[in-house]
Image (tube, rainbow, N blue to C red):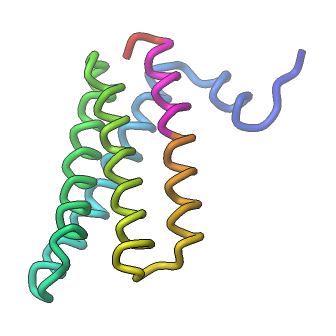
Amino acid sequence: MARDGAAAIVGAMERPTVLVIIALGLALYGVWTALYVPAMLVGGPQPLLLIGFVAQAVLALAAAATVARRHAWATPLVLAFAAAVVVTQLVEGFALQIVPYLRAVFIAVATVVGAIALSAYLRRGGA
């Protein structure tokens, strides 16, 4: 039976290649998020927002390192990273009202779905 879409791409790639791509994506997100922190320190940010972005950056970089090295802690760190993203989005959308709440909910739900799929993939191969 022929596969289509993302399943065909991931199915055609070797597992170590996919793990490197996932780790690279997590690392890039961590660096991208970390670039917000210096500007937030200068401007007198909301403490919850600063904590959320620092947590996202640290957990994304830690998750990238564990995924790349195939440690057992990869799945819990990916889930912790996803939780940091969800909490930060909900704080931005509902508590501080600096982003539209539907956007915050969409990103939170997409993050949960992506984290579940990624953790299932990582658990499947023992990474």
Question: Percent position (x, y) of residue 15?
Answer: 50, 19
Horizontal and vertical percent for residue 8? Answer: 74, 28
Rendered view: 119 above or below 124: below
Is residue 81 a member of the stretch shown in magenta? no
Does 10 sit above or below residue 107? above
Res 87 → quadrant: bottom left
Along the line of sight, the residue nearer the viewer: 25 or 72: 72
Which quarter of the figure has residue 12? top right
Region in magenta:
115-124
Is 120 inside the magenta-drawn segment? yes
Q: Residue 114, how many percent across, how many down? A: 54, 41
Q: Residue furthest right?
A: 1
The structure residue drawn at horizontal position 51% and vertical position 43%, both measured from the top left corner, is 112
Query: In the rendered picture of this protein, how many numbered marks are placed on residues?
Result: 0
Q: Residue at x 18, y 71 (%)?
A: 37
- Locate residue 23 relative to residue 34 in the image: left or right: right
Nearer the observer, 12 or 70? 70
What secondary structure is the magenta-colored segment mainly?
Answer: helix
Picture quarter with the N terminus: top right
Q: Quadrant of the C terminus?
A: top left
Where residue 91 sits in the image (x, y, percent)?
35, 67
At x 46% / y 79%, what residue is drawn? 99
**Residue shown at 44% from the left, 72% from the top:** 93
Name of the residue lying farthest toward the bottom: 43
Q: Is residue 29 left or right of residue 46?
A: right
